[in-house]
Image (tube, rainbow, N blue to C red):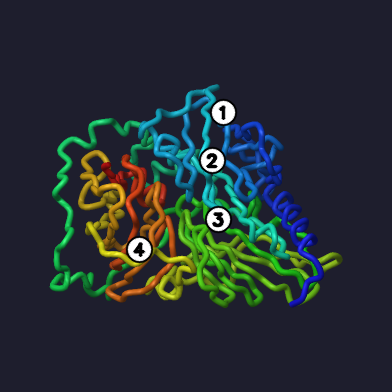
Amino acid sequence: MAYTTTRRGFLAASAAIAASTALPRLAFGQSAPLTLLVSTRVLEIDGRAARVYGLTNGAGGQGLILDPAQQFRVDLTNSLDVETIIHWHGQLPPNAQDGVPDLPMPLLKTGETRSFDYAPNPGTHWMHSHVPVQEMNLLAAPLIVRSADDVAADRQEVVMFLHDFSFRPAEEVLAEITGGTAGHDMAAMGDDAMAGMDMGGDMAGMDHSGMDMSGGDMSGMAMDLNDFNFDAYLANDRTLADPEIISVEKGGRVRLRIVNAAAATTFWIDTGVPARLVAVDGHAIVPIAGTRFGMTMAQRLDIEIDLPGAGAFPVLALREGARERTGLILATTGAQISKISGMAEVDAPAFDIDMAQEMLLQAANPLADRAVDRSHMIMLAGSMKPYLWTIGGQTWDTHKPLVATSGERVELMFHNMSMMGHPMHLHGHVFQVVNINGRAINGAMRDTVYVPPMARVTVLLDAGEAARWMLHCHHMPHLSSGMMTEFAVSA
């Protein structure tokens, strides 16, 4: 498809992001820090008012968008009546700026301001509280870092930010899901977790060829897809009863930046028209054509669509294993927009149980080939009754750190022995998916990988800054019940 200028696409992209998520396009040559205010806000959801949390920028919208090469210089102020802390998901800041309670910085007190300053990674990322009940109360927002290619491209950019939502207090919802076993604030991390750390307990140099990690037969075993039926599923803070309508150009190209910020919901993204998946978790992949792509909690998808002409083009997010859906509508001028039900006619399937989608993904810029210096086997387990989820048989209170030395090539082998899938997120690092259920692949670069029930997924990474980095399940009730450990990197 031919375009006459790139200027038109640049302007359209800026307008679309501002319209779809109220993110101001920030000027080049930033002289003063940007501001973010952790605050409450009121949404109208299916005709009811709901008071939730938010991350409000200097222009009054949610989240941030940065220009190419712009420094992440941000003053974050907490105006809530509770302490909080924000994690910059997908970014690689110095450990002191990572945003985990007491590792190493304490929670931000009411009225306190904290400054951040680092070079951000380009791509589709997000920011959220690292206190589970706060994230469940929508304390999250987009963090988009544009590249020079994004600026030059003749396409419109649209952000689609997904949430699950309950009118009930998040503390009450979490207590119901977990049976009251969750450590809701996750703030008492403590500084003695490194005590007793076995620096020789890795699996480096071991021959794994004789290990049977097949995971057994799943027949007759019940898979648990959803912990809780939320009241609403939101795209850019709205349901399909009143969806956001994005003005697009007839026959234009759109890049959808989709973030799954839900606490406990996996979605299928249905574009309705032919599309291309071009990036995951902010990292380019070899493009894949399709109309339906899945994403678990904390993951991001960048999808390009060449609109077939004039009209209204819904982009829907389907809750896995259920009929609920949300979404937004891309519409050309004068297009007739039909009402879309928030309930599909049939249940959406479970997400990527055989990891067929993940196996298709290939990194556009994979890790350099080198020998593995250290390997860790990471066993994921748990149950619904009692509600308890573990890493290596331990919750956070008794966890044993995974150790590495800065600069080492590290192999992490996740083996899920439970009947729920786990989106596993590692702070401070980007990894490459290289093996799924015993099959080697040149997979995607990610920061959050989905490990389905009874599955095995191996990732490679190069150990970064010598510090304590969190590794946890991004399903908030699982995290709250202790499904977290640390990747402890020494100098």
Among the two numbered marks 2 and 1 on one chain, the one whose residue lies closer to the N terminus: 1
Q: Position of residue 255 (x, y in %)?
A: 65, 64
**Disc on the earlier residue, 3 or 2:** 2
Disc nearer the start of the sequence (1/3): 1
Number of the front mark, 4 or 1:
1
Give the Cα separation between the discs numbered 4 and 1: 36 Å
Whole-angstrom CA distance, mark 3 to mark 2, is 14 Å
Mark 3 is on which residue type?
Val
Q: Which residue type does callout 2 highlight?
A: Leu
Which residue is drawn at the image coordinates 62% and 74% (left, top)? Answer: 275
Distance, label 1 to label 3, CA atoms, is 24 Å
Q: Which residue is mark 2?
A: 139
Q: Residue at x 63, y 70 (%)?
A: 271
For marks 4 and 2, the one nearer the N-term is: 2
Q: Which mark is residue 220?
A: none
Q: Tell me the kind of residue under disc 1.
A: Thr
**Given this view, does label 3 or label 2 mark the residue nearer the observer?**
3
Numbered tag placed on residue 451 in the rendering: 4
Label 1, secondary structure: give it: strand
Residue bearing mark 1 = 77
- Front one among 223 and 257: 257
Query: Tags 4 and 2 in contact by the CB under 8 Å rule?
Result: no
Residue 152 placement (x, y as % from top left): 70, 61
Q: CA distance from mark 3 to mark 4?
A: 19 Å
Locate residue 72: give its quadrant. Answer: top right
Q: Position of residue 285 (x, y in %)?
A: 50, 68
Residue that protrudes farthest toward the top in the picture = 111
Helix, strand or loop at label 4? It is strand
Q: Which residue is mark 3?
A: 259
